[in-house]
Image (tube, rainbow, N blue to C red):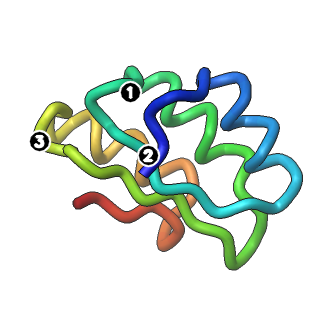
């Protein structure tokens, strides 16, 4: 699980096709949306510690790339 990189660094990884597992308590919902937006087909974003997000925030993040965002 990643918690030591900036959201910008994670966006760069996603933009190049990487799948990511991140600490959701470390990033804002908007930052996670930005990362999700750059996911390639078949790549995923797994958000650990998702209890730190409201249901509405989780819905907003998931809606960016349906089926590619996992909450744990």
Q: Nearer the viewer, residue 66 or 51?
A: 51
Looking at marks 2 and 1 on the same chain, the residue that comes earlier in the sequence is marked by 2
**CB within 8 Å, label 2 to label 1:** no
Q: Is residue 30 positioned above or below 3 on the image?
A: above
Q: Nearer the viewer, residue 20 or 37?
A: 20
Residue farthest along the bottom direction in this orientation: 42
Q: How far is the residue under mark 2 from the one under mark 1? A: 12 Å
Residue on which disc 2 sits: 22
Quadrant for residue 54, please give it: top left
Give coordinates of residue 50: x percent, y percent. Answer: 21, 45
Name the residue: 48% across, 43% down.
2
Tell how many labels.
3
Q: Is residue 62 rendered to the left or right of residue 13? A: left
Give coordinates of residue 58: x percent, y percent. Answer: 28, 44
Circle 1: is it few (<14), some (14-19), or many (20+) Cα within 10 Å?
many
Q: How far is the residue under mark 3 from the one under mark 1? A: 12 Å
Residue on which disc 3 sits: 51
Give coordinates of residue 1: x percent, y percent. Answer: 42, 52
Quadrant for residue 37, please give it: top right
Task: In the rendered structure, find residue 29 and report the number of the disc placed on it.
Answer: 1
Mark 2: secondary structure = strand
Give coordinates of residue 13: x percent, y percent. Answer: 77, 46
Q: Is residue 32 positioned above or below 66 on the image?
A: above
Residue farthest along the right direction in this orientation: 16
Looking at marks 3 and 2 on the same chain, the residue that comes earlier in the sequence is marked by 2
> On the rendered image, what quadrant is the C terminus found in?
bottom left
Q: Is residue 60 rendered to the left or right of residue 33? A: left
């Amino acid at each position: 699980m990643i918690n030591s990189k900036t959201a910008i660094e994670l966006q760069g990884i996603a933009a190049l096709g990487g799948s990511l597992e991140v600490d959701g308590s470390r990033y804002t919902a908007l930052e996670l949306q930005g990362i999700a937006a750059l996911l390639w087909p078949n790549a995923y974003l797994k958000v650990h510690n998702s209890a730190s997000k409201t249901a509405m925030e989780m819905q907003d993040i998931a809606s960016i790339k349906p089926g590619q965002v996992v909450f744990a």
